[in-house]
Amino acid sequence: MEKDTQFRKNFIWNTLGTGLNAFNSLFFMIIATRVNGIEQAGVFTIAFSTACILYAIGLYAGRVYQVTELDEKISDKDFIINRIITCFSMIVFLILFCIFRKYNLEKTVIFLLLTIYKALEAFSDTIYGILQKHDKLDIVGKSLFIKSLLSILLFLIIDLLIGNIIVAIISMIIICVIINITYDFRKAYKYVDFKQKINWENVINILKKGFFVFAISFLGMYVVNAPKYSIDSYLTSDFQTIFGIIVMPATIMSLVAQFLIHPYLNQIVELYKTKNLKGLEKLILKMLGIIGCFGVLATILGYILGTQILGLIYGIDLSMYKIGLSIIIISATLYTIGTVCSSILTTVRETFSQFVIYVGVSIFAYIISTILTKYIGINGSIIAYFFIMVSQALSYFIYTKIKLKKIFVEDKK
Protein backbone atom coordinates (compact mmCIF):
# COMPACT_ATOMS: atom_id res chain seq x y z
CA MET A 1 0.00 0.00 0.00
CA GLU A 2 2.79 2.39 0.96
CA LYS A 3 4.62 1.44 -2.25
CA ASP A 4 1.53 2.26 -4.35
CA THR A 5 1.13 5.61 -2.58
CA GLN A 6 4.76 6.52 -3.29
CA PHE A 7 4.36 5.46 -6.93
CA ARG A 8 1.36 7.80 -7.29
CA LYS A 9 3.29 10.65 -5.66
CA ASN A 10 6.25 9.97 -7.95
CA PHE A 11 4.05 9.84 -11.04
CA ILE A 12 2.03 12.99 -10.23
CA TRP A 13 4.98 15.19 -9.28
CA ASN A 14 7.20 13.84 -12.06
CA THR A 15 4.41 14.62 -14.52
CA LEU A 16 3.98 18.17 -13.19
CA GLY A 17 7.70 18.93 -12.96
CA THR A 18 8.76 17.30 -16.21
CA GLY A 19 5.74 18.81 -17.95
CA LEU A 20 6.45 22.38 -16.98
CA ASN A 21 10.17 21.88 -17.63
CA ALA A 22 9.42 20.61 -21.12
CA PHE A 23 7.09 23.53 -21.78
CA ASN A 24 9.42 26.25 -20.48
CA SER A 25 11.05 26.57 -23.91
CA LEU A 26 7.56 27.25 -25.29
CA PHE A 27 7.03 30.10 -22.83
CA PHE A 28 10.54 31.47 -23.43
CA MET A 29 9.80 31.54 -27.15
CA ILE A 30 6.48 33.31 -26.67
CA ILE A 31 8.09 35.97 -24.47
CA ALA A 32 11.07 36.43 -26.81
CA THR A 33 8.82 36.75 -29.88
CA ARG A 34 6.36 39.15 -28.25
CA VAL A 35 8.89 41.34 -26.41
CA ASN A 36 12.07 41.14 -28.51
CA GLY A 37 10.67 40.61 -32.02
CA ILE A 38 10.79 37.84 -34.60
CA GLU A 39 14.47 38.35 -35.55
CA GLN A 40 15.90 38.08 -32.03
CA ALA A 41 13.46 35.27 -31.24
CA GLY A 42 15.05 33.39 -34.14
CA VAL A 43 18.48 33.78 -32.54
CA PHE A 44 17.06 32.63 -29.20
CA THR A 45 15.51 29.57 -30.91
CA ILE A 46 18.72 28.29 -32.50
CA ALA A 47 20.73 29.16 -29.35
CA PHE A 48 18.33 27.20 -27.14
CA SER A 49 18.39 24.26 -29.56
CA THR A 50 22.20 24.28 -29.53
CA ALA A 51 22.21 24.38 -25.73
CA CYS A 52 19.88 21.37 -25.73
CA ILE A 53 22.24 19.43 -28.01
CA LEU A 54 25.20 20.28 -25.77
CA TYR A 55 23.01 19.26 -22.83
CA ALA A 56 23.61 15.71 -24.06
CA ILE A 57 27.32 16.22 -23.33
CA GLY A 58 26.46 17.37 -19.82
CA LEU A 59 24.20 14.38 -19.17
CA TYR A 60 26.67 12.06 -20.91
CA ALA A 61 25.54 8.57 -19.86
CA GLY A 62 22.35 10.07 -18.42
CA ARG A 63 19.98 9.32 -15.58
CA VAL A 64 18.73 6.09 -17.18
CA TYR A 65 22.28 4.71 -17.04
CA GLN A 66 22.78 5.96 -13.47
CA VAL A 67 19.51 4.56 -12.11
CA THR A 68 19.91 1.21 -13.89
CA GLU A 69 23.49 0.66 -12.65
CA LEU A 70 22.67 -2.80 -11.31
CA ASP A 71 25.98 -3.83 -9.69
CA GLU A 72 26.31 -0.48 -7.85
CA LYS A 73 30.11 -0.50 -8.08
CA ILE A 74 30.11 3.17 -9.04
CA SER A 75 29.26 5.49 -6.13
CA ASP A 76 27.00 8.52 -6.27
CA LYS A 77 30.01 10.72 -5.56
CA ASP A 78 31.76 9.30 -8.63
CA PHE A 79 28.72 10.17 -10.74
CA ILE A 80 28.72 13.73 -9.33
CA ILE A 81 32.43 14.30 -10.15
CA ASN A 82 31.90 12.87 -13.62
CA ARG A 83 28.98 15.26 -14.16
CA ILE A 84 31.06 18.30 -13.16
CA ILE A 85 33.58 17.35 -15.87
CA THR A 86 30.93 16.83 -18.56
CA CYS A 87 29.12 20.08 -17.71
CA PHE A 88 32.36 22.04 -18.01
CA SER A 89 32.91 20.33 -21.38
CA MET A 90 29.60 21.80 -22.59
CA ILE A 91 30.97 25.31 -22.22
CA VAL A 92 34.22 24.46 -24.03
CA PHE A 93 32.38 22.93 -26.99
CA LEU A 94 30.00 25.89 -27.18
CA ILE A 95 32.86 28.39 -27.40
CA LEU A 96 34.51 26.36 -30.17
CA PHE A 97 31.17 26.10 -32.00
CA CYS A 98 30.60 29.88 -31.92
CA ILE A 99 34.12 30.50 -33.21
CA PHE A 100 33.57 28.00 -36.04
CA ARG A 101 30.22 29.58 -37.01
CA LYS A 102 31.73 33.11 -36.75
CA TYR A 103 28.84 34.49 -34.70
CA ASN A 104 28.91 38.12 -33.55
CA LEU A 105 29.40 39.01 -29.86
CA GLU A 106 25.71 39.41 -28.96
CA LYS A 107 24.74 36.11 -30.57
CA THR A 108 27.69 34.36 -28.91
CA VAL A 109 26.71 35.69 -25.46
CA ILE A 110 23.12 34.44 -25.89
CA PHE A 111 24.43 31.01 -26.94
CA LEU A 112 26.86 30.93 -23.99
CA LEU A 113 24.33 31.94 -21.33
CA LEU A 114 21.73 29.43 -22.49
CA THR A 115 24.41 26.72 -22.49
CA ILE A 116 25.32 27.59 -18.88
CA TYR A 117 21.61 27.37 -18.01
CA LYS A 118 21.39 23.89 -19.53
CA ALA A 119 24.70 22.88 -17.88
CA LEU A 120 23.17 23.63 -14.49
CA GLU A 121 20.15 21.56 -15.48
CA ALA A 122 22.43 18.69 -16.52
CA PHE A 123 24.24 18.82 -13.18
CA SER A 124 20.92 18.73 -11.32
CA ASP A 125 20.01 15.57 -13.21
CA THR A 126 22.71 13.53 -11.47
CA ILE A 127 21.26 14.66 -8.11
CA TYR A 128 17.86 13.62 -9.43
CA GLY A 129 19.32 10.21 -10.28
CA ILE A 130 20.39 9.75 -6.65
CA LEU A 131 16.88 10.66 -5.45
CA GLN A 132 15.21 8.40 -8.01
CA LYS A 133 17.30 5.41 -6.94
CA HIS A 134 15.85 5.92 -3.46
CA ASP A 135 12.31 6.12 -4.90
CA LYS A 136 12.06 9.88 -4.35
CA LEU A 137 10.97 10.90 -7.84
CA ASP A 138 8.35 13.18 -6.28
CA ILE A 139 11.18 15.40 -4.94
CA VAL A 140 12.66 15.52 -8.44
CA GLY A 141 9.31 16.62 -9.84
CA LYS A 142 8.93 19.35 -7.21
CA SER A 143 12.42 20.68 -7.97
CA LEU A 144 11.77 20.79 -11.72
CA PHE A 145 8.40 22.47 -11.15
CA ILE A 146 9.84 25.20 -8.90
CA LYS A 147 12.80 25.90 -11.18
CA SER A 148 10.70 26.03 -14.32
CA LEU A 149 7.99 28.23 -12.85
CA LEU A 150 10.41 30.76 -11.32
CA SER A 151 12.60 30.81 -14.45
CA ILE A 152 9.62 31.61 -16.67
CA LEU A 153 8.29 34.31 -14.34
CA LEU A 154 11.69 36.00 -13.93
CA PHE A 155 12.42 35.81 -17.65
CA LEU A 156 9.06 37.46 -18.37
CA ILE A 157 9.33 40.19 -15.72
CA ILE A 158 12.94 41.16 -16.51
CA ASP A 159 12.42 41.09 -20.28
CA LEU A 160 9.28 43.24 -19.99
CA LEU A 161 10.95 45.74 -17.67
CA ILE A 162 14.32 46.01 -19.42
CA GLY A 163 13.69 44.57 -22.87
CA ASN A 164 17.07 42.86 -22.75
CA ILE A 165 17.03 39.13 -23.47
CA ILE A 166 20.58 38.65 -22.13
CA VAL A 167 19.74 40.01 -18.67
CA ALA A 168 16.57 37.88 -18.67
CA ILE A 169 18.63 34.71 -19.30
CA ILE A 170 21.05 35.65 -16.50
CA SER A 171 18.09 35.80 -14.09
CA MET A 172 17.20 32.19 -15.04
CA ILE A 173 20.75 31.08 -14.26
CA ILE A 174 20.64 32.71 -10.82
CA ILE A 175 17.37 30.93 -9.98
CA CYS A 176 18.84 27.53 -10.95
CA VAL A 177 21.93 28.06 -8.77
CA ILE A 178 19.85 29.06 -5.75
CA ILE A 179 17.48 26.06 -5.99
CA ASN A 180 20.34 23.64 -6.66
CA ILE A 181 21.95 24.71 -3.39
CA THR A 182 18.92 25.24 -1.14
CA TYR A 183 16.68 22.37 -2.30
CA ASP A 184 18.34 19.70 -4.51
CA PHE A 185 21.54 19.30 -2.47
CA ARG A 186 19.69 19.45 0.84
CA LYS A 187 17.29 16.66 -0.17
CA ALA A 188 19.97 14.37 -1.65
CA TYR A 189 22.69 15.02 0.94
CA LYS A 190 21.72 12.18 3.29
CA TYR A 191 21.97 9.60 0.50
CA VAL A 192 25.55 10.47 -0.54
CA ASP A 193 28.66 9.45 1.37
CA PHE A 194 30.79 12.56 0.88
CA LYS A 195 33.53 11.12 3.13
CA GLN A 196 34.15 8.40 0.59
CA LYS A 197 37.23 8.97 -1.56
CA ILE A 198 36.78 9.81 -5.21
CA ASN A 199 37.47 6.75 -7.34
CA TRP A 200 38.96 8.32 -10.45
CA GLU A 201 38.98 4.95 -12.17
CA ASN A 202 35.19 4.85 -11.78
CA VAL A 203 34.87 8.45 -12.99
CA ILE A 204 36.80 7.52 -16.13
CA ASN A 205 34.88 4.25 -16.49
CA ILE A 206 31.61 6.20 -16.63
CA LEU A 207 33.05 8.10 -19.59
CA LYS A 208 34.14 4.83 -21.21
CA LYS A 209 31.07 2.73 -20.50
CA GLY A 210 28.66 5.58 -21.06
CA PHE A 211 30.21 6.80 -24.32
CA PHE A 212 27.70 5.15 -26.60
CA VAL A 213 24.79 6.27 -24.39
CA PHE A 214 26.13 9.83 -24.67
CA ALA A 215 26.75 9.53 -28.41
CA ILE A 216 23.21 8.24 -28.92
CA SER A 217 21.74 11.13 -26.93
CA PHE A 218 23.94 13.71 -28.67
CA LEU A 219 23.17 12.42 -32.15
CA GLY A 220 19.51 12.09 -31.17
CA MET A 221 19.39 15.78 -30.29
CA TYR A 222 21.15 16.65 -33.54
CA VAL A 223 18.70 14.55 -35.54
CA VAL A 224 15.75 16.48 -34.06
CA ASN A 225 17.40 19.84 -34.72
CA ALA A 226 19.10 19.14 -38.07
CA PRO A 227 16.51 21.16 -40.05
CA LYS A 228 17.14 24.17 -37.76
CA TYR A 229 20.84 24.23 -38.65
CA SER A 230 19.98 24.06 -42.33
CA ILE A 231 17.66 27.06 -41.78
CA ASP A 232 20.49 28.84 -39.93
CA SER A 233 22.73 28.27 -42.97
CA TYR A 234 20.33 29.01 -45.83
CA LEU A 235 17.38 31.05 -44.52
CA THR A 236 16.85 34.14 -42.34
CA SER A 237 16.21 34.32 -38.58
CA ASP A 238 12.48 35.01 -39.06
CA PHE A 239 12.09 31.59 -40.72
CA GLN A 240 13.97 30.11 -37.76
CA THR A 241 11.33 31.60 -35.48
CA ILE A 242 8.46 30.24 -37.60
CA PHE A 243 9.96 26.75 -37.73
CA GLY A 244 10.66 26.92 -33.99
CA ILE A 245 7.02 27.78 -33.33
CA ILE A 246 5.46 24.99 -35.42
CA VAL A 247 7.95 22.46 -34.06
CA MET A 248 7.13 23.47 -30.48
CA PRO A 249 4.05 21.18 -30.23
CA ALA A 250 6.42 18.28 -30.86
CA THR A 251 7.65 18.95 -27.32
CA ILE A 252 4.33 17.56 -26.09
CA MET A 253 5.16 14.18 -27.59
CA SER A 254 8.62 14.15 -26.04
CA LEU A 255 6.91 15.02 -22.78
CA VAL A 256 4.64 11.97 -23.10
CA ALA A 257 7.73 9.78 -23.49
CA GLN A 258 9.27 11.20 -20.30
CA PHE A 259 6.00 10.72 -18.41
CA LEU A 260 6.01 7.07 -19.39
CA ILE A 261 9.68 6.17 -19.20
CA HIS A 262 10.83 7.53 -15.82
CA PRO A 263 8.01 6.14 -13.62
CA TYR A 264 8.30 2.71 -15.29
CA LEU A 265 12.12 2.47 -15.30
CA ASN A 266 12.25 0.38 -12.12
CA GLN A 267 9.59 -1.97 -13.53
CA ILE A 268 11.51 -2.37 -16.77
CA VAL A 269 14.69 -3.23 -14.84
CA GLU A 270 12.79 -5.75 -12.67
CA LEU A 271 11.20 -7.47 -15.68
CA TYR A 272 14.60 -7.71 -17.34
CA LYS A 273 16.30 -9.07 -14.21
CA THR A 274 13.60 -11.73 -13.76
CA LYS A 275 13.81 -12.63 -17.48
CA ASN A 276 10.10 -11.93 -17.99
CA LEU A 277 10.02 -11.34 -21.75
CA LYS A 278 6.22 -11.51 -22.03
CA GLY A 279 5.80 -8.99 -19.24
CA LEU A 280 8.37 -6.67 -20.80
CA GLU A 281 6.81 -6.89 -24.26
CA LYS A 282 3.38 -6.25 -22.74
CA LEU A 283 4.68 -3.13 -20.94
CA ILE A 284 6.35 -1.86 -24.13
CA LEU A 285 3.18 -2.35 -26.18
CA LYS A 286 1.18 -0.58 -23.48
CA MET A 287 3.52 2.43 -23.60
CA LEU A 288 3.56 2.54 -27.42
CA GLY A 289 -0.23 2.20 -27.53
CA ILE A 290 -0.68 5.22 -25.26
CA ILE A 291 1.77 7.23 -27.39
CA GLY A 292 -0.01 6.22 -30.60
CA CYS A 293 -3.45 7.23 -29.29
CA PHE A 294 -2.11 10.51 -27.97
CA GLY A 295 -0.37 11.16 -31.31
CA VAL A 296 -3.59 10.65 -33.31
CA LEU A 297 -5.53 12.99 -31.00
CA ALA A 298 -2.76 15.61 -31.09
CA THR A 299 -2.59 15.49 -34.90
CA ILE A 300 -6.36 15.99 -35.28
CA LEU A 301 -6.44 18.86 -32.80
CA GLY A 302 -3.31 20.36 -34.33
CA TYR A 303 -4.86 20.41 -37.81
CA ILE A 304 -8.14 21.90 -36.63
CA LEU A 305 -6.92 24.45 -34.08
CA GLY A 306 -3.12 24.38 -34.03
CA THR A 307 -2.13 27.26 -36.30
CA GLN A 308 -4.90 29.51 -35.00
CA ILE A 309 -3.87 29.00 -31.38
CA LEU A 310 -0.14 29.34 -32.10
CA GLY A 311 -0.77 32.42 -34.24
CA LEU A 312 -2.79 34.01 -31.44
CA ILE A 313 -0.12 33.19 -28.83
CA TYR A 314 2.85 34.41 -30.85
CA GLY A 315 1.14 37.19 -32.79
CA ILE A 316 2.19 35.73 -36.16
CA ASP A 317 0.02 34.55 -39.07
CA LEU A 318 0.69 30.80 -39.39
CA SER A 319 -2.39 29.81 -41.44
CA MET A 320 -0.25 28.67 -44.39
CA TYR A 321 1.53 26.12 -42.16
CA LYS A 322 -1.57 24.10 -41.20
CA ILE A 323 -0.48 20.93 -43.02
CA GLY A 324 3.12 21.49 -41.96
CA LEU A 325 2.11 21.52 -38.29
CA SER A 326 0.24 18.22 -38.69
CA ILE A 327 3.29 16.66 -40.34
CA ILE A 328 5.45 17.85 -37.43
CA ILE A 329 3.13 16.29 -34.82
CA ILE A 330 3.02 12.96 -36.69
CA SER A 331 6.81 13.06 -36.94
CA ALA A 332 7.17 13.77 -33.23
CA THR A 333 4.93 10.80 -32.40
CA LEU A 334 7.23 8.56 -34.41
CA TYR A 335 10.28 10.00 -32.65
CA THR A 336 8.71 9.28 -29.26
CA ILE A 337 8.25 5.62 -30.21
CA GLY A 338 11.96 5.51 -30.98
CA THR A 339 12.74 7.13 -27.62
CA VAL A 340 10.85 4.42 -25.70
CA CYS A 341 12.70 1.69 -27.63
CA SER A 342 16.00 3.45 -26.92
CA SER A 343 15.37 3.41 -23.16
CA ILE A 344 14.61 -0.32 -23.29
CA LEU A 345 17.83 -1.02 -25.19
CA THR A 346 19.82 1.16 -22.76
CA THR A 347 18.41 -0.81 -19.83
CA VAL A 348 19.70 -4.08 -21.33
CA ARG A 349 23.00 -2.26 -22.01
CA GLU A 350 22.59 -2.51 -25.78
CA THR A 351 24.29 0.72 -26.80
CA PHE A 352 26.72 0.15 -29.65
CA SER A 353 23.93 -0.87 -32.01
CA GLN A 354 22.01 2.29 -31.08
CA PHE A 355 25.11 4.30 -31.88
CA VAL A 356 25.27 2.68 -35.32
CA ILE A 357 21.57 3.42 -35.90
CA TYR A 358 22.00 7.08 -34.96
CA VAL A 359 25.14 7.57 -37.04
CA GLY A 360 23.16 6.38 -40.05
CA VAL A 361 20.12 8.51 -39.21
CA SER A 362 22.32 11.58 -38.51
CA ILE A 363 24.05 11.33 -41.88
CA PHE A 364 20.65 10.95 -43.54
CA ALA A 365 19.33 13.93 -41.50
CA TYR A 366 22.19 16.21 -42.56
CA ILE A 367 21.89 15.32 -46.25
CA ILE A 368 18.10 15.52 -46.55
CA SER A 369 17.82 18.69 -44.40
CA THR A 370 20.49 20.47 -46.40
CA ILE A 371 19.01 19.55 -49.79
CA LEU A 372 15.33 20.16 -49.00
CA THR A 373 15.88 23.39 -47.05
CA LYS A 374 18.24 24.82 -49.63
CA TYR A 375 15.93 24.17 -52.58
CA ILE A 376 12.41 24.23 -51.08
CA GLY A 377 12.83 26.53 -48.08
CA ILE A 378 11.00 26.11 -44.79
CA ASN A 379 8.54 23.60 -46.27
CA GLY A 380 11.55 21.53 -47.23
CA SER A 381 12.69 21.63 -43.60
CA ILE A 382 9.29 20.30 -42.49
CA ILE A 383 9.37 17.45 -45.02
CA ALA A 384 12.94 16.63 -44.01
CA TYR A 385 11.87 16.48 -40.34
CA PHE A 386 9.21 13.90 -41.24
CA PHE A 387 11.54 11.61 -43.18
CA ILE A 388 14.17 11.81 -40.42
CA MET A 389 11.65 10.74 -37.76
CA VAL A 390 10.35 7.87 -39.93
CA SER A 391 13.86 6.50 -40.39
CA GLN A 392 14.61 6.79 -36.65
CA ALA A 393 11.38 5.15 -35.44
CA LEU A 394 11.47 2.24 -37.89
CA SER A 395 15.13 1.49 -37.20
CA TYR A 396 14.59 1.44 -33.44
CA PHE A 397 11.34 -0.50 -33.35
CA ILE A 398 12.56 -3.29 -35.63
CA TYR A 399 15.91 -3.63 -33.90
CA THR A 400 14.43 -3.61 -30.37
CA LYS A 401 11.97 -6.39 -31.21
CA ILE A 402 14.69 -8.55 -32.74
CA LYS A 403 17.26 -7.90 -29.99
CA LEU A 404 14.97 -8.60 -27.02
CA LYS A 405 13.95 -11.98 -28.41
CA LYS A 406 17.58 -12.83 -29.08
CA ILE A 407 18.68 -11.87 -25.54
CA PHE A 408 15.99 -13.92 -23.81
CA VAL A 409 16.50 -16.96 -26.08
CA GLU A 410 20.24 -16.94 -25.27
CA ASP A 411 19.50 -16.63 -21.53
CA LYS A 412 17.26 -19.72 -21.65
CA LYS A 413 20.09 -21.72 -23.18
Image: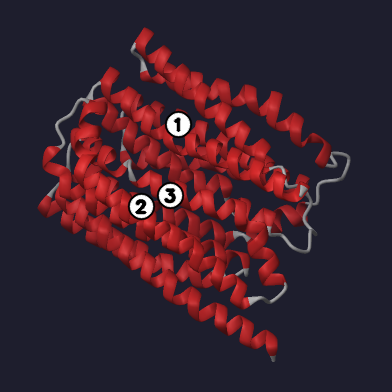
Residue 103 occupies quadrant: top left
Distance CA(mark 2)–CA(mark 3): 11 Å
Please, what is the three-letter code of the amino acid marked with disc 1?
A: Leu
What residue is drawn where x is 24% and y is 40%?
Answer: 306
Q: Is residue 307 left or right of residue 229?
A: left
Q: CA distance from mark 1 to mark 3?
A: 20 Å
In this view, the residue in front, 296 or 114, is 296
Drawn side of residue 341 relative to residue 38, left or right: right
Residue that badge 2 annotates: 224
Q: Earlier in the sequence, mark 1 or mark 3?
A: 1
Marks 2 and 3: CB-CB under 8 Å? no
Q: Residue at x 46, y 49 (%)?
A: 256
Q: Residues within 10 Å of mark 2 (few under 14, many from 20)?
A: many
- Mark identifier at residue 169: none
- Amino acid type, mark 3: Ser
Reading the image, the residue beneath label 1 is 114
Question: Given this view, does label 1 or label 2 mark the residue nearer the observer?
Answer: 2
The x and y percentages for residue 171 are: 50, 18
Amino acid type assigned to the residue bearing label 2 in the image: Val
Quick one: 25 or 177, which is closer to the camera?
Answer: 25
Q: Which of the 4 image quarters holds residue 27?
A: top left
For the C terminus, which image quadrant?
bottom right
Residue 100 in the image: above or below residue 44: below
- Whichever of labels 1 and 2 marks the residue nearer the N terminus, that label is 1
Say whether residue 123 is visible.
Answer: no
**What secondary structure is found at the residue carrying circle 1?**
helix
Query: Residue 380, position in %: x, y?
Result: 16, 53
**Which residue is drawn at the image coordinates 66% and 41% (left, top)?**
9
Kindly identify which numbered label has been placed on residue 254.
3
Separation of marks 1 and 2 at Cα, in angstroms: 18 Å
